[in-house]
Amino acid sequence: MEAVARLVAKLPRSAHPILVTDGMFSHDGSVAPLAEYLKILPPAGKILVDDAHGAGVLGARGRGTLEHADVNRTRIIQCATLSKAFGAYGGVVLGARALRNKIIMRSRMFAGATPLPPPLAGAALAALRILKREPQRRQRLFANLSYLRARLRAADWEITETPGPIVRLPQMNSAAANHLKKHLLAARIYPPFVKYGKASAAGVFRFVISSEHSERQLNRLAHVLGEFKNKRS
């Protein structure tokens, strides 16, 4: 927020800035402070939110980062993918009707893109209906998240508490990382070691939790990570 405030302070009064940000950050599940950004931006300023990881997950009804932050769409353009929480394909831009009309009339990318095949559009609509009618899926998702985090903390792992269903392990040296990869593969667990720019330039293990993970699967992951932690202690 401090960095945004410094940039805004340098703008002329007539400026119409657009702040571009992720909604939920995929490297650790943290969330952009949208309400605070809106207070910092001038009245003519807007926010473009890439809510690929937040849509379908965050908020009381799974509507994403805006619902989680309790802000409306008056000054925010929300983009989301249909390929993550919704299990389909393609993407959406959510905004005012005027914005929709501008995209249809003026966006070369939109006009030149091939439309989604009807079965994929149908799958996305079905996923939206499931999100609305079956809140227990999201309840199960966050129950799984809480369960795994508790197991790992009991094994002395330092696990950050973030709103998103992502468990990120602390950074470790390359020798330890390679050792853990071997342990995970031996347990038939794919080792998701990722690098996300400055946030985790050296690479971190990042586990994305699903509503469909079974307790047995979560226990196996917790057991492998617990054994690894004990051997390093």
Image (spheres, rainbow, N blue to C red):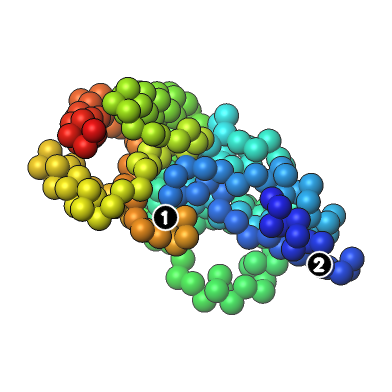
User: Residue at the spot x=57%, y=34% of the render?
Assistant: 59
In the rendered image, residue 34, in percent from the top left (x then y), is placed at 67, 46
In the rendered image, residue 218, in percent from the top left (x then y), is placed at 26, 29
* Residue labelled with disc 1: 200
Q: CB under 8 Å between callouts 1 and 2?
A: no
In the rendered image, residue 232, in percent from the top left (x then y), is placed at 21, 37
User: Residue at the spot x=17%, y=42% of the render?
Assistant: 184
Between 111 and 39, the residue placed more toward the observer is: 39
User: Residue at the spot x=35%, y=48% of the render?
Assistant: 171
Is residue 119 among the parts visible in the rendering? Answer: no
Q: Which mark is residue 96?
A: none
In the rendered image, residue 2, in percent from the top left (x then y), is placed at 71, 52
Between 7 and 68, the residue placed more toward the observer is: 7
The residue at the far right in this view is: 13
Assign a secondary structure to mark 2.
Answer: loop
Circle 2: residue type: Lys
Q: Tell me how far mark 1 sits from mark 2, CA to CA.
A: 30 Å
Number of callouts in the render? Answer: 2
User: Residue at the spot x=40%, y=40% of the render?
Assistant: 166
* Residue labelled with disc 2: 10
Above or below for 76 versus 65: below
